[in-house]
Image (tube, rainbow, N blue to C red):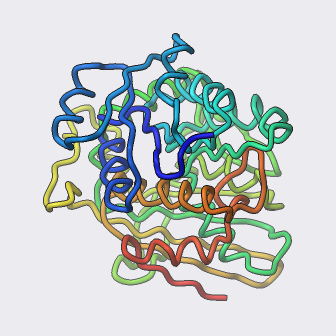
Amino acid sequence: MGSGRTVAVYGAYGHTGRFVVAELWDRGFVPVLSGRDPEQLRALAASRPGLEARPATVDDPASLDRALAGAAAVINCAGPFAATAAPVIEAALRAGIPYVDVAAEIEANLDTFTQFADRARAAGAVVIPAMAFYGGLGDLLVTAAMGDWTAADEAHIAYGLDRWHPTAGTRAAGKVSRERRDGRRVRYTAGRLEYRDDAPPTVNWPFPDPLGHRAVIGDFTMTDVVTVPSHLAIPEVRTYMTVEAARDLAAPDTPTPAAVDGLGRSAQTFLVDVLVRSGGEERRAVASGQDIYAVSAPLAVEAVHQVLTGRTRTVGVASAGAAFDAPGFLRALSAHISLELSR
């Protein structure tokens, strides 16, 4: 096991990785900078004197072991996670430390649950995939909205993004996912993933103010269809995306995010509207904030903090909602998101 305030960040120089490093630093952790490119690591270390750079590649287990040596936990920010998650989890298991990642790839997160559930549980290890805006935040909101319900008929997660300027990592991960599913789209219905060749529908979603009614792409499926059903008895989990954001993501010439404040955040705003139905009853949870990549950092770092302070509910591979007290976790993010729960 590592010393309590040292956290390795794999993919530290990437767009989200830099936010994670800054969040760790601001919260009194000592980030260890790791990733595949020694030059980018050295440049990042030079911008934060005193931090150590440890290059490592996923095809060299010994280099990963050196990168994680002495760390209390590791946060994997390096996509595509189809290539990085398993090797870094293996290294975390060898080191006996918790693993957290920010993967938004449906297939990569399925792989993590499938390949490591038994081993991580047997080792008493904590492995938390998708601890980010997609997968983690939605799961926490659904879990919080459920409250004392043990099951529900359906969960709807509507993403109200005013724009989406994707990073190079987002584009690369999306390409890998499309190739793995042969270009088909996916949705979670009747308790299983269903792959389809038809075009997704465009529907209207009644977001709360200030967004109001907006056109959204129905079955714009994100990794919430992995995290939510992993621990909640909900046979229908649907996700939606505002048309404007979906159009940005699809366009090959949409620029990457541009910083507009001292924290490095873009001007992008988001509102995540969660609706859970059981019988004739409905419960709702809403979160809003700025910059989906930037907000992934406090989600991942808070997860590490709660794991290291013994506030997890389970061991093994677990989604955010299964691992933590969802309302309490969301309240801990009050500096980064506005939250409204209604039951």
Is residue 104 visible in the rendered image? The answer is: no
Q: Quick check: 14 above or below 64?
A: below
| Left or right, residue 306 beside residue 34 | right
Q: In the orientation shown, which residue stands out farthest toward the top?
A: 60
| Left or right, residue 47 beside residue 94 | left
Q: Give the image location of residue 337, x and y in percent.
A: 40, 73
Quarter of the image for the C terminus: give it. Answer: bottom right
Residue drawn 22% across and 47% down? 257
Is residue 321 visible in the rendered image? The answer is: yes
Q: Give the image location of residue 338, x and y in percent.
A: 41, 78
Number of dots carrying numbers: 0
Viewer-nearest residue: 44 or 146: 44
Q: Quick check: 340 above or below 159?
A: below
Q: Give the image location of residue 72, x and y in percent.
A: 55, 44
Residue drawn 52% across and 57% down? 240
Q: Quick check: 111 above or below 327?
A: above
Quarter of the image for the N terminus: give it. Answer: top right
Residue drawn 38% across and 59% down? 28
Q: Which image quadrant is residue 82 in?
A: top right
Q: Quick check: 12 above or below 152?
A: above
Q: In the orientation shown, which residue stands out farthest toward the bottom?
A: 343
Q: Give the image location of residue 45, x and y in percent.
A: 23, 35
| Left or right, residue 137 beside residue 36 | right
Viewer-nearest residue: 284 or 24: 24
| Left or right, residue 311 beside residue 29 | right
